[in-house]
Amino acid sequence: MRLFAREGYAAVSMRQIAGEVGVQAGALYNYTPDKQTLLFDLMKAHMDDLLTAWEAEAAPEHPLEALERFARFHIRFNTERADAVFVSYMELRNLSPKNFEVIEGLRRRYEDQLEHILRRGVALGLFDVAEPKITTMAVIAMLTGVNTWFRDGGRLSLPDVETIYWDMVRRAVTPEPAANRG
Amino acid sequence: MRLFAREGYAAVSMRQIAGEVGVQAGALYNYTPDKQTLLFDLMKAHMDDLLTAWEAEAAPEHPLEALERFARFHIRFNTERADAVFVSYMELRNLSPKNFEVIEGLRRRYEDQLEHILRRGVALGLFDVAEPKITTMAVIAMLTGVNTWFRDGGRLSLPDVETIYWDMVRRAVTPEPAANRG
DNA sequence: CTTTGATCTGAACGGGTGTTCAGATAATTT
DNA sequence: AAATTATCTGAACACCCGTTCAGATCAAAG
């Protein structure tokens, strides 16, 4: 995964991967039928991890609390696996159509978790979200973006960052009070 | 650019590129010293386009209007050049260190445009943004995310999408009125 | 119509690619 | 200790890579 993230699937050779684990290239074929399947297996394992980890979060009933949980979870989970996240987004084009469908299905299932929170919040009058699907995409893109700049040991701790992003997400979906005239 | 976006820099051969423009591979070397420089030139041209186009927007004085202008501009410009945007983000790792520096510098210059708008808005009390640099990254990530799902001819027009995203951005940076007690 | 300069071809260079497989080696079971 | 199974090596296969370059082809200038 590290090699794929750093150099790209196409640019990494089976001999390179083998070298990384101290073995000749041929030996890899005891573990994967081919390079393509190796990529797919890595990506699928990552998506399964993601869904399993979220399911284990036991999101609160209240949509606002659930949304905060989701935002913090997403940032934490993704920053801990920057290589896997990068590969799972970037190397989609190197999957066979059938494998692509599987990964996309898992991704959609994850997105649905957030969309569902938003829709419940709208139903309860807690959120002002005209297009839940679009807001879902926007929030996920924003949160995943942390990966492009966050580095451990910087000025801000991860909980700090979580709080800043959660604040932006909350304000983006929370109703604005009517203008306050007397 | 289309080939690089669709298959990845490493996976595209000079023979493929040549074929696409109806020529033999050797002929390409009348136009580029090597493949790496070809990638760099494409990416640099894209970043130059981006900065030039933004400078031509003549952003309004008022930070709120400037921010709206930026949000709409960013969505419009990027959705019109999905291939270039994808390549410029994803193939950074295939640039030599020196070329990487150049592209990163241009990207930072673009980000500074937004950061400057945010800082002016904070100074005027129009925005509530604790960390302008982080908000800059968050907003750009969110807006660029439109590229992952927007397709022409869908249910929503591009101006519709611009408006939805602008609304989220505005709310994310605009002060919340103090709780309204009687 | 010839000359000049730009452009393109097609072959070649050394080297890297994913994958296979017979035979060697190591680990486990009997 | 012997037999069996799992694992690894190292060479080979057919093929593709970026790049170079002598010679062919084309377009414009004199």
Image (tube, coloured by chain):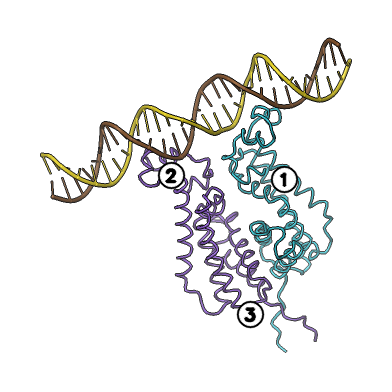
Chain colours: A cyan, B purple, C yellow, D brown
Q: Which residue is mark 3?
A: B126
- Residue A171, image x, y percentages: 71, 70
Q: Which mark is residue A93?
A: none
For the residues bearing labels 2 and 3, Cβ distance under 8 angstroms: no
- Residue A114, image x, y percentages: 73, 57
Q: Is label 3 in a helix, a strand or a loop?
A: loop
- Residue A108, image x, y percentages: 69, 50
**Host chain of mark 1:** A
**Host chain of mark 3:** B
Q: Residue at x 58, y 76 (%)?
A: B64
Quadrant of the frame with the C terminus of chain A: bottom right
Q: Nearer the viewer, residue C8 or B154?
A: C8
Q: Residues within 10 Å of mark 1 (few under 14, many from 20)?
A: some
For the residues bearing labels 1 and 2, Cβ distance under 8 angstroms: no
Q: Which residue is mark 1?
A: A46
Question: Which one is closest to the eye, mark 1 or mark 2?
Answer: 2
Q: Residue at x 53, y 45 (%)?
A: B6
Q: Residue at x 50, y 62 (%)?
A: B77
State the image quarter where residue A58 is shown: bottom right
**Host chain of mark 2:** B
Q: Amino acid at mark 3?
A: Leu
Q: Amino acid at mark 1?
A: His
Is residue B82 depicted above or below A162 in this figure? above
Q: Which residue is mark 2?
A: B34
